[in-house]
Image (cartoon, rainbow, N blue to C red):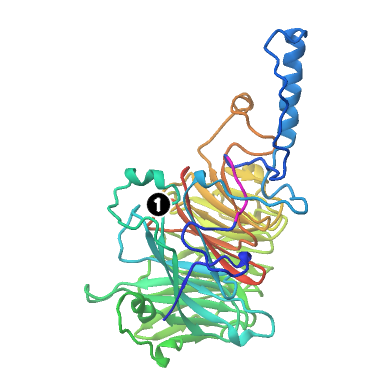
Amino acid sequence: MSKRPAEDYENGGVPLKGGERQEKPEIVDEVGEFEDEFEDEFESDEIFEAGVDGRPDAERESEEKADSMDVDQQTFIVGRNKLEEGQTMSPDLTTYEMLHQLGTEWPCMSFDIVKDSLGDNRGTYPATMYAIAGTQADPGRAKDNKLMIYKFSGLSREDKGLAEESDSDDEDEDSESILEYKSIPLTSTTNRIRAHQTPALDSSRPPTTLTASWTEAGEVLIHDVTPHLTSFDVPGTQITPQQNKPLSTLRMHKSEGYGLDWSPLISTGKLITGDNNGSIYVTTRTGGEGWATDSRPLVGHTGSIEELQWSPSEKNVFASASSDGSVKIWDVRSKSRTAALTMQISNTDVNVMSWSQQTNHLLATGDEDGAWAVWDMRQWKSSSSTVAASKSSAVASFNHHKQQITSIEWHPTDDSIIAVAAADDTLTLWDLAVELDDEESKDTGGVADVPPQLLFVHYMPTVKELHWHPQIPGCIVSTGSSDGVGKFNVFKTISV
């Protein structure tokens, strides 16, 4: 087993103890003002009392209003404004309940959280969690790629002043965050990876955890990582070479792809995969270690399959998003092998998609141009042809991000909260329940071009994927890279 403290490779690769971090962008009330650390500390000693500086009150008030406008114009919007040479940003730690940055040897551009037996709705610290990921080694070093199985532990809370309010009796709030891992050799970069758990027949045994890895080589690898997860907490557990081999290697696709999802309603295991040629295949576990893939693909998209997601409530229904700008709804029982519904929702690629777990008719999508939207699928009418849907017909749509959306996900228990990651190096949290008219926006001191629904902005270089932790309310895990090394950010804000 390899065990290492969380590291910040941007700090020269020096291990950091718990609580010590390199400064990152400062985000104050979601849209922070940049402060120059070299700013002149001396201010004028001249003080004017109201009404005694020789000027009429109206003149003084007019000048104060102009000064206020100048300040507004200088507001630094993370992800929109650019730092000047030599300038840095750091996070406002008072806005985080928990914030940890952990480094990995190679970037892991796709990952998934593994549910554990530590309990649901937990808020104790230090926190522990488990995840799986696929690496993206440097070009020319494909054989260095691995399937990674992680344990994150010692994740302490940020504001120690809140410790008295915690229900926890933990003795070590300041424990050092630890990253432990097991790895399975791969020979290709992982484009997308997802985990699925099958309940054990014996309640005394842990569930079986399967992973599906969509590789750059055009194969989908299915592994059983149960023994790897067990080894973190059961001393003496040995991993055999046989346990590192895939249960199955799916080679039906003619090109690589990114679309991948396990059915949440089929416990034995049912998988959909989509490739860059626009073909979608359904693979089902047949019993034991057998897997069967439908001989005929589901076709209809004219572009690559960017995202696939099963319905959270209908076991035979799933959605697909494509670079052709459309979203299709499919029923795997259809003999025609064509989509039941097609909506043209964008003039550019639809990169990512998320189906609400709480309100099953809501679907969120994110585009190549930085726009994202929420759709009410009850308004989409069945048709044999493609139907165009403008952003004006969406439940909500936003153009705050100016670069491609790389990940989007609904809060698992609150259908008004959505997390969005973009190529502008930001991860934003949104509250769709906020509805302010123009007058109310002025009263709240809103910043121009920043929607009132924008709840929080977290800065993370090259952020690629995010997931809410299903058992730690409000906790987000995200992955990205910086200077060729991988980064995981684990955080929880005080606002969610």
Q: Residue at x 73, y 37 (%)?
A: 74
Comparing 368 with 315, the one in front is 368
Q: Quick check: can you spot residue 100?
A: yes
x then y, percent, for residue 301: 65, 67
Q: How crowded is mark 1: few (under 14 residues within 10 Å), some or many (20 or more)?
A: some
- Magenta span has 26? yes
Q: Give the range drawn in magenta.
A: 23-28
Q: Quick check: can you spot residue 385?
A: no
| Residue 124 position by quadrant | bottom left
Does the magenta stretch mainly form a helix, a strand or a loop? loop
Comparing 174 with 399, the one in front is 174
x then y, percent, for residue 414: 43, 47
Can you name the residue that lies furthest to the bottom here? 241
Comparing 197 with 23, the one in front is 23
| Mark 1: secondary structure | loop
| Residue 231 position by quadrant | bottom left
Residue type of the residue flagged with mark 1 = Pro
- Magenta span has 314? no
x then y, percent, for residue 324: 69, 63
> Quarter holding the N terminus?
bottom left
User: How many numbered badges does the structure rendering display?
Assistant: 1
Q: Residue at x 29, y 74 (%)?
A: 206
Residue at which label 1 appears: 473
x then y, percent, for residue 31: 62, 41
